[in-house]
Amino acid sequence: MVRKEKIDVINSQSVYVDQPSIPNRFVAFVPQSDEAELRHLGEEISRKVREEWGQIVFKTMEGLNITCPEDKVEKQIKRFPEIYWVALPLKIGDRDIAIEDLGEIFESTEKYRDIWQFAVDNGEYSPNLGLLYQIIYSSLEKLIGARKKSEEF
């Protein structure tokens, strides 16, 4: 696909680099910060992924002329892929999330505070959430790790 579009692939070791793959994770910045809205969005994305996966499975089975009781296939579709998601609101009330709000996730946020203060003191513009991308992403990584380790009940 990449080569068909005349895009040069640099440093590729794989002959399959032009074939699409399924990401094992993705991050989305969305305008919602309300817990109920975020929960609904996460559940809706999970539902859509499972729905699309189910269509892929049934189309593949049909294309390969594979027969199997539909209830068994549905049962497997419900278990794979495993979907875990977390949300981190970027706004708390009327204000943007701050480094201090992430203190429960990290042992120390001092380096991020130093970077923020440096930007305040020396930057041409006031710092914004973009400067916190690394700590926000790291927070999501820690939260999803904790989520995956917790048992469903």
Image: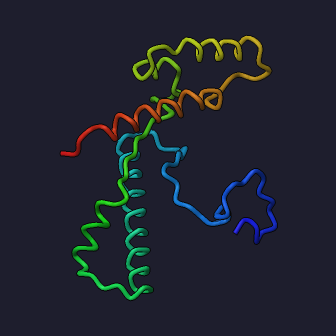
Up the image or down, 145 lies above or below 5; here it is above
Q: Residue at x 43, y 79 (%)?
A: 60
Quarter of the image that includes the N terminus:
bottom right
Of 5 and 42, nearer the camera is 5
Q: Residue at x 37, y 58 (%)?
A: 81
Q: Quadrant of residue 80?
A: bottom left
Coloring basis for residues:
rainbow
Up the image or down, 122 lies above or below 142; here it is above
Q: Give percent across and percent down for residue 39.
A: 36, 47
Residue 59 shown left or right of residue 147 in the figure? right
Up the image or down, 88 lies above or below 52; here it is above
Up the image or down, 153 lies above or below 9; here it is above
Q: Give percent across and percent down for residue 23.
A: 52, 54
Q: Residue at x 59, y 17 (%)?
A: 112
Of 7 and 113, nearer the camera is 7
Q: Give percent across and percent down for residue 119.
A: 71, 17
Q: Quadrant of residue 85?
A: top left
Residue at the extreme left of the image, as rendered: 153
